[in-house]
Image (spheres, rainbow, N blue to C red):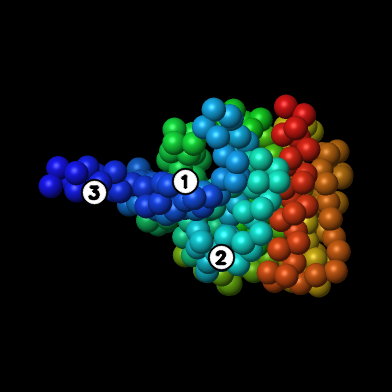
């Protein structure tokens, strides 16, 4: 009976802490008062006596924490190739990765930057410094990655975006953003100030290593090209890729390789 109790206690917060390459964890969110799941992908040769860089990889609208690893299982090989740990948080199906000013049940910025980050750094052999952290994502997650990195430059040294919805004003009626910010007509400042395309104006060159990637047939292509031009006008160094592709997993399966290669180059320099 005592052994059973110990096993139950150990499984409260950790669903799959084993010697496998992929762990599914549940971390308590102090602001949302609930446990939120994430996937952690380790290199095959993971060793606790090493310190690995961490890449936080965000999912898109209507998906969840398991979407990346289930749809692009090759990211497990990429974790091994680059000797990094990849963390795929759950961001709620439509959180856009900020702390909602109108819904206390959607506080995913705090969850990722505080609760999840501290849990990962306590339970895994990772570099506990901004130089060892990067964040990227697709679509809603592309916006989220850039948003979180700009707001938390003390935590992240690198950020990327794949087909990112980096301008919330692209559509004020789609993707349920209004549920997280309130109607645009009632809260225009919230929408404007939280759009990455405006937030980059606060950046100084060199504060973040940035990588932006979008297909030319993607419905977000124009806003990404506009962001690229804006960064050029601000003299903010960044990598920008546009190539044939749409807003789909075929594109993102390829794009994640470019993102991790970009991050790995800087990690190696450290």
262 vs 153, nearest the viewer: 262
On the image, which quarter does residue 256 sit in? Answer: bottom right
- Crowding at mark 3 (Cα within 10 Å: few <14, some 14-19, many 20+): few
Residue 216 rendering spot, x and y as whole percentages:
83, 68
* Residue displayed at 77% across by 29% down: 269
Per the image, label 2 sits on a secondary structure element best described as helix
Mark pair 1, 2: CA separation: 19 Å
* Residue displayed at 50% across by 58% down: 65
In the rendered image, which quarter contains the C terminus? Answer: top right
Mark pair 3, 2: CA separation: 27 Å
Viewer-nearest of discs 3 and 1: 1
The residue tagged 2 is 70
Viewer-nearest of discs 1 and 2: 1
The residue tagged 1 is 19
Per the image, label 1 sits on a secondary structure element best described as loop
Residue 8's tag is 3
Residue extending furthest toward the left = 1
Query: Given contact means CB atoms under 8 Å apart, are the residues at marks 3 and 2 in contact?
Result: no
**Residue 177 vertical position relative to residue 156 in the rendered view, above or below:** below
Residue 223 in view:
no
On the image, which quarter does residue 51 sit in? Answer: top right
- Which badge, 3 or 1, comes first in the chain's sequence? 3
Q: In the image, 28: left or right of 95?
A: left
In this rendering, the count of numbered labels is 3
261 vs 93, nearest the viewer: 261
Q: In the image, 203: left or right of 100?
A: right
Residue 65 in view:
yes
**Residue 198 vertical position relative to residue 247 in the rendered view, above or below:** above
- Which badge, 1 or 2, comes first in the chain's sequence? 1
Residue 105 rendering spot, x and y as whole percentages:
37, 56
- Which badge, 3 or 2, comes first in the chain's sequence? 3
């Amino acid at each position: 009976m005592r052994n059973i109790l110990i096993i139950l206690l150990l499984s409260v917060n950790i669903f799959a802490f084993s010697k496998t390459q992929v762990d599914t964890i549940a971390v308590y969110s102090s602001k949302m008062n609930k446990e939120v799941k994430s996937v952690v992908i380790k290199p095959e040769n993971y060793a606790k006596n090493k310190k690995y860089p961490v890449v936080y990889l965000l999912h898109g609208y209507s998906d969840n924490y398991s979407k990346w690893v289930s749809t692009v299982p090759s990211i497990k090989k990429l974790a091994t190739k680059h000797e990094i740990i990849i963390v795929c948080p759950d961001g709620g199906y439509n959180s856009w990765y900020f702390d909602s000013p109108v819904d206390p049940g959607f506080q995913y910025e705090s969850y990722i930057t505080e609760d999840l980050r501290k849990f990962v750094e306590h339970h895994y052999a990772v570099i506990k410094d901004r130089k060892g952290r990067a964040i990227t994502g697709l679509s809603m997650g592309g916006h989220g990655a850039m948003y979180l990195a700009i707001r938390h430059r003390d935590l992240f040294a690198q950020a990327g975006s794949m087909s990112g919805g980096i301008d919330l004003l692209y559509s004020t009626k789609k993707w349920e953003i209004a549920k997280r910010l309130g109607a645009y007509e009632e809260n225009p400042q919230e929408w404007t100030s939280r759009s990455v395309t405006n937030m980059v104006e606060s950046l100084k060159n060199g504060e973040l290593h940035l990588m932006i990637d979008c297909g030319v047939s993607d419905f977000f292509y124009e806003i990404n090209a506009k962001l690229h031009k804006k960064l050029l006008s601000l003299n903010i160094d960044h990598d920008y890729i546009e190539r044939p592709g749409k807003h789909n997993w075929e594109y993102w399966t390829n794009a994640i390789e470019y993102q991790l290669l970009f991050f790995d180059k800087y990690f190696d320099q450290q």
